[in-house]
Image (spheres, helix red, strand yellow):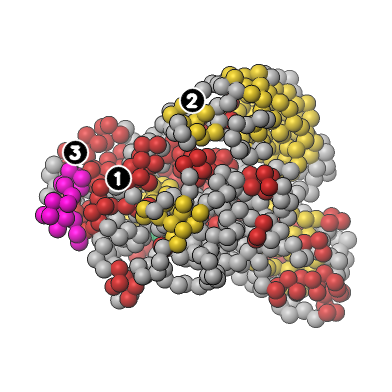
Amino acid sequence: MRMNGVSALWMSAAFALSAAVGNFPQMLMAQEMTRRADFKPAMDYVSASAKADEILAKLSVEEKIEMIGGHDFFFVKGFPQYGIPQLYLSDATAGVHIRRELSNQLGKSVAFPAPIALAATWNPNLAERAATAIGQECRAGGIAVLLGPGMNIYRISQCGRNFEYFGEDPFLASRMIEKFVTGVQSTGTIATLKHFLCNNTDYKRRRSNSVVDDRTLHEIYLPAFRAGVDAGAMAVMTSYNQVNGEWAGQSKYVIDTLLRKDLGFKWLVMTDWWSTYDPGKLIKSGQDLDMPGSPRVGDPQFEKLGDVYVRTNAKRLLAEGKVTEREIDLMVKDILSTEIAMGLLDRPVKDDKFLANFPEHEAAALQLAMEGTVLLRNERNILPITERHAKKILLTGSYVARVPAGGGSSRVEGYDNLTMLDALTEEFGGALDYLPDPSEDDIRNAGVVIVGIGTDDSEGWDRPFALPEKTNRMLLRYSNLNPNVVVVVNSGGGVGMDAWNERVAGIVYAWYPGQEGNRALAEILSGKVSPSGKLPITIEKKFADSPGHSYLPKGEELYTGPKSDIDPSIPVYDISYDEGIFVGYRWYDSKEIEPLYHFGFGLSYTSFDLNSLSFSKASLMSGDTLGIEITIENTGRMSGAEVVQVYVGEKNPTLPRPPMELKGFTKVSLQPGEAKKVSLKIPVDSFSFWDSQKHAWNLNSGDYNIHIGTASHDIRFSKTVHVEG
Ligand code: BGC
């Protein structure tokens, strides 16, 4: 069966989960994923755009032009005489970035763990909880538009912005994004899906061209945006890079065709900051808002760029007949319709009542860190740390006396930040010794050695996958001296650990934990909480094993530091997405490359058994839903949570397809000895592939393998179903 792009809405509706019925003693309630209805603005699109037309008729050309370019870096112009408010826009996905302009409006904002940690929770309800908190802080600060969620797919482990995104899998990312969007917008704040499209590296991001085929776009890079659009997101930000030869922010193909026609997006589209070069093209592309709308004064790179801004060129372009007033009207109309639909003309943006909710926001940040921390290795049950480590706990490493966070526009300062040192001192008291530079005897004599290592990832550049040789040597030396070394990694994505992985006793992946995250880490290390995070990425043994590893221009080395790429004399380089749809585990599985850690993997202090699997049907048709019921039991001695993961692979595909792809999951909390029956519903149409020739989804008839497990390589049951497409 074929469906066209727009009608293929199953991509977001694909995931549905319901509590099991029947006589099983324990119903799944607490962790059940409640798919809140998609966001509906206060006014629907038709009414909002009719009202926008009325206002538009009152605006002069000059006033309209003032609206389609930003002001003072983060503002959209308001016209109080027509009831149009000024809009303040602010970053982003891990909390509110408080800028100079905002500091007197919002004194503080909660620093949440980075979005990749949120993805590692595999708990979309937490995405909604965190996003609601962030939306409320926006309201408290008078921010109308949150410049997030960031959601580019993790294609390259070196990408400096991976921490801002939701990992390598479009299905997992989609389920988190839709909840993020509904959470933010439920507060009256506009969520912005960014960066559209294929901004999967930050290496010379303004001078790169992502060359990617139609099928790959639809199967890998568009689904999370589609999920956000379907959930009701009211804004989208285009990206810095070119997509197939055109700058995304001024490309009719990217904005008008892919975003507006294929995904059906109707509302506000804005550029990323200083990312377009041809104001005439921009006006005709479906773009609405040129941000920030003026150059950075005194910066020589901007002088080279010349006057490429819409606000300063639109009048001339009109006079020369290169653009029409109608085209400018369409841009203003999208801005106005979005503001009207969100009710921004009828209520103040700022609402102080949300300031009272900060304790709940902190609690959400803590819960998120608890569920997002991933335990990768735990030899001889080195963790949790208990009395059996009668000797000292030695803490060392360069990441323990600060709160590591990603850099760039998404950075959130937070307050009352707890370092690893503070948190572990609070947890372990006198049993903990912090020694920045321990001697061999210090290491040898410790009961357990906790070493904090990491990377400083940031927007604006990429960073090496490999850790510095110095770090590898240090860990090897420590593990030669003491068998009980536990490494805590603070990073925004995968790092090279193969050199010492098997030599250390424990590895905890703690990402960028936010202001409360080290408290969560302390509770996990001490065993108050069992870890339940699962990798939203695959971690390769070496970078050369990974898809897209040859993305850098020939002969160029990674730079890790602010190096302006805005200079138009820097040649544009092509990034060929040659691996196509084989991104992340799809790549490692199909190439049979063994990674160091698999997608979906994460250990617990307790153990889980899956049993009593049943399928609703063995043979299904397009339009049907496959019901899966399975019982999960906590067979260990601690309470904990496990993620049931469902992967699907076509048995005899008519074109290359991944051996398996994630199509469903649910996270379940269980007391020791407790069992729950869970039920997942998976629409059969989600087994389709994108047929580029027909520009449509296509569901092949045939047999499909359904794999159910607790990680992509830990499959407990595999069964086949027959599908008639
Ligand atoms: C980033 C965007 C951000 C914008 C405004 C840009 O550098 O790429 O993600 O929203 O700045 O701060």
Q: Nearer the viewer, mark 2 or mark 1?
A: 2
- The correct choice, above or below, for 144 with respect to 633 in the image is below
The residue where tag 2 is placed is 2
Q: Residue at x 13, y 51 (%)?
A: 321
Label 3 SS: helix
From where the camera sits, is residue 587 visible? yes
Name the residue at 29% across, 56% down. Answer: 290
- Residue 216 drawn in magenta: no
Question: In the image, what residue occupies the spot 71% across and 43% down?
Answer: 711
Image quadrant where one finds the C terminus: top right
Q: Is mark 2 within 8 Å of ligand 1?
A: no
Tell me the amino acid under the disc marked 3: Asp
The front one of 445 and 337 is 337
Residue 286 is tagged as 1
Instruction: Assess disc 1: are there few (<14), some (14-19) or many (≥20) residues with their C-alpha within 10 Å of its C-alpha.
Output: many
> Which residue is found at the position 73% from the left and 80% from the top?
437
Q: Amino acid at mark 1?
A: Gly
